[in-house]
Amino acid sequence: MQNGKIGVTTENIFPIIKKFLYSDHDIFLRELISNAVDATQKLKTLASIGEFKGELGDLTIMVKLDEKAKTLTISDHGIGMTAEEIDKYINQIAFSGAEEFLEKYKNQSIIGHFGLGFYSAFMVADKVEIITRSYQENSKTMEWSCDGSPEYTMQEAKKQRDRGTDIILHLSEDSLEFNDAARIREILKKHCSFLPVPIAFGKIKEWKDGKYVDTDKDDIINDVEPLWTKKPADITPEQYLEFYRKLYPMAEEPLFHIHLNIDYPFNLTGILYFPKIRNNFEIQKNKIQLYSNQVFVTDSVEGIVPEFLTLLHGVIDSPDIPLNVSRSYLQSDSNVKKISSYITRKVADRLNEIFKQERADYENKWDSLKIFIEYGIITDEKFAEKATDFVLLKNVDQKYFTLSEYATLVKEGQTDKNGNVIYLYATDKQAQYSFIAEAQERGYDVLEMDGQLDNHFISWFESKNQGTRFARVDADVIDKLIEKETKRKMALTTVQQDLLRPVFDAQLPKDDKMHFNVVFEPLDEKQQPVVITQNEFMRRMKDMAAMGGGG
Ligand code: ADP
Ligand code: MG
């Protein structure tokens, strides 16, 4: 029997662990199960290189809750540990690392997904036992036990077990919320749904004689080969949809998916979906789940992935995203930053590809897709650069154009008096009907710009394209445009016009009067002798103010 003191200077570190990790105690299970998965994967590796010659057998990791005894046991058939390894990995290393870690992160707001590996168990247990036997020949089953003080006991077990490790948690009085099968299942589902080794919790139930009874089949809670780990060429569109439904059972079918599969300069896989949003008020951020080697890290990805991607759905998995760190650390990590800009590039490239290959489909979905693209353009310069190839403009006749296509469509001489090329647009097809008709009659095309972010998009576009301006069809600028083109015969003399003007002026809203112009027209086939136009600049300023900010 070996008794010892765990290699740490702090008198009793367990209260500190509890205090610092208060926000998300669930993490303990993820930590212990990742260790079991690691131990299993190591054994498989050893077998594949011929270092382990025995039978692998059933490698399922078993999670068992004994509600009477208030114990939770995690059992694996991985490599196990020898007495020396327990000494090295549990008694010494884990703890010295922990102390440093706590010192470093003491003053940061630590959010949930941060664990101390094995010692996270003490967040919920006042006593932890390890029963383990190494895969190595002639190894003995060892028992280790620690009751939350820095002292532990270690001895050879009376009863030998087969290869692998049991971790037994004696749940503490203030953690009895975990002495509940439904709660454990919920945590397993959240953190372990896609781990690469089967994990069983309880038995599959069967409806029999009016109630559910256990069958003898293990209930495997995870999918060991989630879709994002497979080759895109081997996946059918239906499988992509099925996976989406599994992740977001309540959501409408997505517009597109993008399968990320990057192996240089870092490893990253994932599937991103552009969700279909019923109406723009329902946009929810932070739906992407972040994984590290199929271990769930967080679903709060703000600051980790590019801003506009927080509107997307799906999963991102990268072993280069560190597991056991605080959120502020993740956000400042240079690797994570690199990953973030790389994803942006990949998403842009893929959108461009979809646009080129399936333009009709892309156009069909554009009205829903537009908000994401415009948001990306407004918030991310790199994305904007690429998106100029696949951002579309729609005209009032529901025809779609790329920016360069549209540039060739504007009529020659469609310029204002300063020589700016003018893009005409309507924000409300019904209300602006007569203006649209008038512009079209003169051979001008009119765009439809009625989206939530269109004003911001226009500002961005104008700042990038000096010499091109957007003007609403009912704005004064169109009038100058038209005036230039033809000298038509006015119906009213200048004197008559001056007499009439105050009559119209008096009808205009008082506070806004300054921004309206009354324009007399020639009486031609259209029979519209007077047009009231609005100053484009003033109107836009007002619209922006109403939206709560400029572009
Ligand atoms: P980490 O997993 O980051 O190495 P942990 O504190 O979680 O840190 O675990 C410390 C070490 O203890 C592991 O690296 C491993 O060597 C050993 N270990 C923990 N759990 C198991 C297990 N179930 N089977 C075999 N070894 C284990
Ligand atoms: Mg670990």
Image: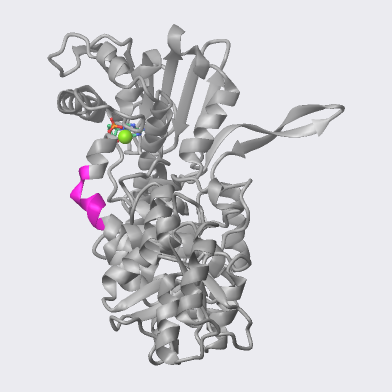
Q: Quadrant of the N terminus?
A: top left
Q: Can you give x and y, in whole percent of width and height, for residue 406 in the image?
A: 43, 83
Q: What kind of secondary structure does the magenta stretch mostly adopt?
A: helix
Q: Is residue 376 left or right of residue 4?
A: right
View quadrant of ligand 1:
top left
- Identify the residue at horizontal 22%, vertical 22% (top origin): 91
Q: Can you give x and y, in whole percent of width and height, for residue 460 in the image?
A: 32, 65
Q: Is residue 299 left or right of residue 68?
A: left
- Identify the residue at horizontal 43%, vertical 41% (top origin): 299
Q: Is residue 487 left or right of residue 337?
A: right
Up the image or down, 33 lies above or below 276; here it is above
Q: Residue furthest right?
A: 209
- Identify the residue at horizontal 37%, vertical 71% (top origin): 387
Q: Can you give x and y, in whole percent of width and height, for residue 502 in the image?
A: 49, 63
Q: Nearer the viewer, residue 529 or 315?
A: 529
Count of residue discs: 0
Q: Is residue 250 left or right of residue 17?
A: right
Up the image or down, 242 lies above or below 123; here it is below
Q: Nearer the viewer, residue 156 or 486?
A: 486
The span shown in magenta is 332-338
Q: Quadrant of residue 360?
A: bottom right
Q: Nearer the viewer, residue 1 or 224?
A: 224
Q: Can you give x and y, in whole percent of width and height, for residue 43 in the image?
A: 37, 45
Q: Nearer the viewer, residue 227 or 85?
A: 227
Q: Quadrant of the C terminus?
A: bottom left
Tell whether position 337 is magenta: yes
Tell whether position 276 is magenta: no
Up the image or down, 462 lies above or below 360; here it is above
